[in-house]
């Protein structure tokens, strides 16, 4: 463990504490989180830290996320937020949220969540993690609030005293929009960490002295000359990730070394919007149809093998909890009591849960008749 101290003017939400081993460590959480602190990071970004009840702590890997249940206008709404703190900071879990225009959940968190308030949550979830792809050289690429998962990775590697070569390249609109700016400047003083910040434009009060514009192949190679030999992790708005994907392909990066956050819905690391519901087409090819019994609802419906169970249930008027609709958030997870499914999810369910017989209804299509505990 490296002995670290933050400079006094970081304005960050992180303390790099020693990991505690006195409290119960949970791998799987579905319960209540109590807000323990709220910290302004930029003019429109705040960090919210939480503690678990009974001094328990959550075991997670850097880059994973939680699903929060937030009461918006009295209606519970679920959204996924990446954990921005490091696993060693197990006493408190921190998420960092950018206020999104017309974003009901991000605005609710900024306007209403206060220290002492309690929210429902579950997790951790997700496979976007440097822990799953160990390497001597890493390139962490982010834009906007997509910085949160890669910041958790960087913090964790520093916490572990890692000697890995880390290139951290972050894009922001203006100097005023640089999330964790003071902390990044401090981390840049580490001999194995190189931080490059790119701003699209100056702010009203500061002329940016670093690279300006948007990330380009030339800027990327200058900031990460060892790109081709590195493990690469990317998170940001969908257009940014598409541009980075095109760049690394152009530069000849091994696709097996390129990883990106699977959130593609709105602001990365932040709200997930309901996906467009599949609508079975009358012209669609005929496929096998199976009976799906929802035991607690007392309903049985037909569902063909090309339609998700959630879509079929929604079409039949059966209300079920769901949020992202893309196998990410885990909110539609249910127990499969009998039958077989084809499930293609995006990290919203753990291997252990699959072994226990749980399925994500948004990502599962029947391959036999089913009975579901819902």
Image (spheres, grey):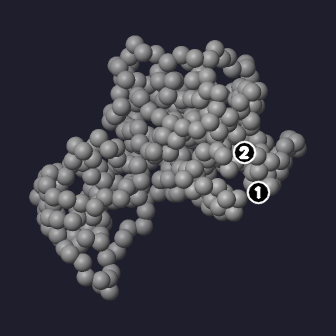
Check disc 2 and report its element: helix, strand or loop.
loop
Does 295 appear above or below 131? below
- List x then y, in percent, for residue 103: 54, 52
Q: What SS does tag 1 mark?
A: loop
Which residue of the protein is positioned furthest toward the bottom in this rendering? 283
The crowd level at tag 1 (other Cα within 10 Å; few <14, some 14-19, many 20+) is few
Choose top left, top right, bottom left or bottom right for residue 209: top right
Residue 291 visible? The answer is yes
User: Which residue is the site of mark 2?
Assistant: 226
Picture coordinates of residue 76 (x, y %)? Answer: 37, 46
- Residue at 59% from the left image edge and 59% from the top image edge: 238
Q: CA distance from mark 2 to mark 1?
A: 16 Å
User: What residue do we see at 50% from left, 36% from top?
Assistant: 131
Q: Which mark is residue 216?
A: 1
Residue 298, image x and y in percent?
11, 58
In the image, 226 versus 297, the foreground residue is 226
Residue at screen point 15% across, 58% down: 339
> Relative to residue 357, is residue 351 drawn left or right?
right
Q: Nearer the viewer, mark 2 or mark 1?
A: 2
Q: Is residue 67 left or right of residue 87?
A: left
Q: Earlier in the sequence, mark 2 or mark 1?
A: 1
- Res 250 → quadrant: bottom right
The image shows residue 307, relative to residue 324, as above or below, that is below
Pick the front one: 354 or 280: 354
The answer to whether the residue labelled 2 contacts the one labelled 1, judged by CB atoms less than 8 Å apart, is no
């Amino acid at each position: 463990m490296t002995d670290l101290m933050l400079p006094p003017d970081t304005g960050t939400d992180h303390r790099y504490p020693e990991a505690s081993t006195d409290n119960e460590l949970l791998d799987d959480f579905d319960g209540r989180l109590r807000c323990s602190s709220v910290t302004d990071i930029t003019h429109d970004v705040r960090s919210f830290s939480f503690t678990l009840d009974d001094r328990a702590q959550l075991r997670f890997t850097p880059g994973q996320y939680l699903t929060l249940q937030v009461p918006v206008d009295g209606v519970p709404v679920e959204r996924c937020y990446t954990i921005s703190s490091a696993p060693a900071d197990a006493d408190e879990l921190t998420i960092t949220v950018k206020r999104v225009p017309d974003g009901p959940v991000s605005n609710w968190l900024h306007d209403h969540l206060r220290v002492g308030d309690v929210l429902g949550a579950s997790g951790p979830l997700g496979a976007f993690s440097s822990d799953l792809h160990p390497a001597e050289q890493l390139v962490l690429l982010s834009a906007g609030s997509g910085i949160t998962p890669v910041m958790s990775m960087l913090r964790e590697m520093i916490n572990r005293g890692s000697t890995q070569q880390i290139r951290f390249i972050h894009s922001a609109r203006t100097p005023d929009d640089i999330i964790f700016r003071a902390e990044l400047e401090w981390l840049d003083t580490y001999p194995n960490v190189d931080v490059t910040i790119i701003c699209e434009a100056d702010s009203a009060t500061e002329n940016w002295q670093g690279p300006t514009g948007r990330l380009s192949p030339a800027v990327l190679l200058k900031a990460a000359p060892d790109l081709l030999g590195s493990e690469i992790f990317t998170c940001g708005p969908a257009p940014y990730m598409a541009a980075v994907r095109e760049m690394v392909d152009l530069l000849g990066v091994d696709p097996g070394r390129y990883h990106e956050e699977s959130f593609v819905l709105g602001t990365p690391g932040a709200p997930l919007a309901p996906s467009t519901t599949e609508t079975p087409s009358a012209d669609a090819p005929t496929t096998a149809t199976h009976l799906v019994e929802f035991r607690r609802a007392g309903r049985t419906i037909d569902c063909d093998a090309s339609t998700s169970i959630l879509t079929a249930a929604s079409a039949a008027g059966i209300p079920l909890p769901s949020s992202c609709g893309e196998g990410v958030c885990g909110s539609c997870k249910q127990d499969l009591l009998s039958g077989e499914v084809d499930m293609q999810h995006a990290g919203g369910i753990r291997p252990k849960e699959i072994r226990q017989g749980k399925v994500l209804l948004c990502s599962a299509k029947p391959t036999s008749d089913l009975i579901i505990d819902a």
